[in-house]
Image: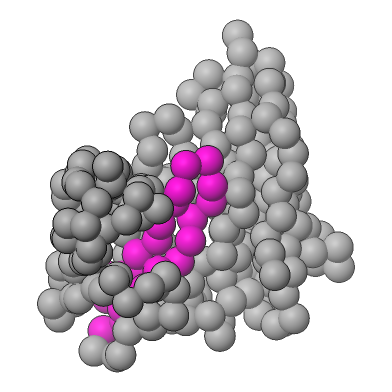
Amino acid sequence: AQKITQTQPGMFVQEKEAVTLDCTYDTSDPSYGLFWYKQPSSGEMIFLIYQGSYDQQNATEGRYSLNFQKARKSANLVISASQLGDSAMYFCAMREPYGNNRLAFGKGNQVVVIP
Amino acid sequence: GAGVSQSPSNKVTEKGKDVELRCDPISGHTALYWYRQRLGQGLEFLIYFQGNSAPDKSGLPSDRFSAERTGESVSTLTIQRTQQEDSAVYLCASSLDGAGGATDTQYFGPGTRLTVL
């Protein structure tokens, strides 16, 4: 069963605007971690932000913030003040403790920032 | 400091040949992971090494795939008798200790793009 769902089609975003990328997840374990990675066309996976299931506050890292809604099992990534260099694929991933620390990835969201 | 490195960056091989892919984790990281990314898809877990523990091989798709790790350093992923469906990018990641805490983030290498003709 798919554990991470990212279903948005490719998105075009105006430079300097904010964009929200949706991610829903499925787990029965109360302890888990959620990650977002960025993959530009060059192919490397770049870690952006982490949210633990017991964290009381939404995670923030610079222009990235995570809108964590535990009851809805969603962990949406918000990128504020988009820049041209933000054009990339964005992957949501979940780590479960009984999964030997492996990450389960969604299929990704494509973002293109236009000037 | 140096990140995760992988070699080769690209590998083209003929169907039926064996290939070896190499990963050098971040120095001091005891946990190492291999993932596969097919074109246009997310990453699929393959195998996980943590210190001297037995590796978690549950993600390996067939017995043609195997991996080794020397201590807490270099790892090699071997694919025997390659098939066209093995064509993908193979990504290696390492993390501090595999304990799963807030700081145990996986950092990825640039990947090896494998093409099987």
> Is B31 contained in the magenta span?
yes
The percent coordinates of residue B2 (x first, y second) are 20, 51
Q: Which residue is situated farthest in the bottom direction here? A: B53
| Residue A12 against residue B14 in the figure, above or below | above
| Residue A52 against residue A83 in the figure, above or below | below
| Residue closer to the observer: B24 or B43 | B43
Count of numbered badges drawn on the protein: 0
The percent coordinates of residue A4 (x first, y second) are 67, 60
> Which of the 4 image quadrants contains residue A25?
bottom right
Quadrant where the C terminus of chain B lies?
top left
Q: Which residue is situated farthest in the front direction here? A: B16
> Which of the 4 image quadrants contains residue B106?
bottom left
The percent coordinates of residue A73 (x first, y second) are 79, 64
Q: Is residue A32 left or right of residue A67?
A: left
Residue A61 visible from this viewpoint: no
Colour scheme: one colour
Q: Is residue A34 left or right of residue B43?
A: right
Task: Give me the residue at 54% from left, 47% from top.
Answer: B41
Q: Is residue A83 left or right of residue B88?
A: right
> Which of the 4 image quadrants contains residue B17?
bottom left
The percent coordinates of residue A23 (x first, y second) are 72, 52
> Is A18 contained in the magenta span?
no
Q: Is residue B43 left or right of residue B47?
A: right
Residue A82 visible from this viewpoint: yes
| Residue A112 against residue B76 in the figure, above or below | above
Task: Give me the residue at 38% from left, 83% from top.
Answer: B56
Task: Give me the residue at 55% from left, 37% from top.
Answer: A89
Q: Which residue is situated farthest in the right direction here? A: A71
Task: Give me the residue at 66% from left, 80% from top.
Answer: A31
Q: Main secondary structure of the magenta part?
A: strand
Q: Which residues are magenta?
A: B27-51
